[in-house]
Image: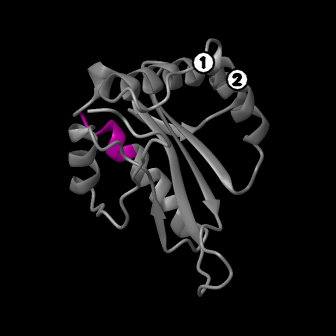
Amino acid sequence: MNIRTATEEDTPAIGLMWERLASYHNTLDSALPAAARGGGKVYAKRLATRMNDPLTRVFVAEQDDKLVGYVLAVIIDVIPDMFVQENSGFLADIFVEDVYRRHGVGKLLVETVRTWMLENNVRHFEWYVAEHNAAGRQFWEAIGGRAVLTRMRANTQHEES
């Protein structure tokens, strides 16, 4: 398994993986948004514009010259200026093709992000995991993740019982 920094040439394949990621989450919970028609192409174009951004990294997992996973991470200011500032990271997306899951690919991708963040003096990074994604939550806990906040949602209109 080879983990490397993504190139602009990788973005179409990453866009297709993103579509599968969005579909997976929407299947877990219909409250999570489905990909729009052509959403993967839009995602790929947006990634291509960020390839030279020093605060953004996309890493890909490659097996036998085929992309089998990716991760998108950014260094961001997630703390309003009324709090003590510290460099923070955000792992925006991670996806590994089904047949490569539970083989350490996701862990390699996250460790690559962790190394990049350490090199940039980032003390911690955060991510979202879907409440109904038991396998995802188990993965994050296994690599040392812990819940800090719970994001909740309510409809603006009350549902009738």
Q: Nearer the viewer, residue 146 or 122?
A: 146
Q: Is residue 134 above or below residue 140?
A: above
User: Three-letter amino acid code at disc 1?
Assistant: Ala
User: Three-letter amino acid code at disc 2?
Assistant: Val
- 116 inside magenta stretch: no
Question: Do labels 1 and 2 touch, CB within 8 Å?
Answer: yes
Q: Which residues are magenta?
A: 103-108
**Mark 2 crowdedness (10 Å alpha carbons): few <14, some 14-19, many ≥20:** some
Mark whose residue sits in front, 1 or 2:
1
**Location of mark 1 (residue):** 36
- At horizontal 27% and vertical 29% (from top left) the residue drawn is 101
Residue 11, position as x, y percentages in the image: 65, 25
The answer to whether residue 140 is left or right of residue 87 is left
The answer to whether residue 39 is left or right of residue 19 is right
The answer to whether residue 154 is left or right of residue 119 is left
Residue 69, position as x, y percentages in the image: 44, 29
Q: Is residue 81 above or below residue 131?
A: below
Q: Quadrant of the N terminus?
A: top left
Q: Nearer the viewer, residue 69 or 39?
A: 39
- At horizontal 26% and vertical 38% (from top left) the residue drawn is 132
Question: Residue extending furthest front?
Answer: 160
Residue 42, which numbered label? 2
* Earlier-in-chain disc, 1 versus 2: 1
Q: Quadrant of residue 96?
A: top left
- At horizontal 60% and vertical 85% (from top left) the residue drawn is 83
- At horizontal 27% and vertical 56% (from top left) the residue drawn is 143
Residue at disc 2, secondary structure: helix
Q: Nearer the viewer, residue 154 or 61?
A: 154
CA–CA distance in space, label 1 to label 2: 9 Å
Q: Quadrant of the C terminus?
A: top left
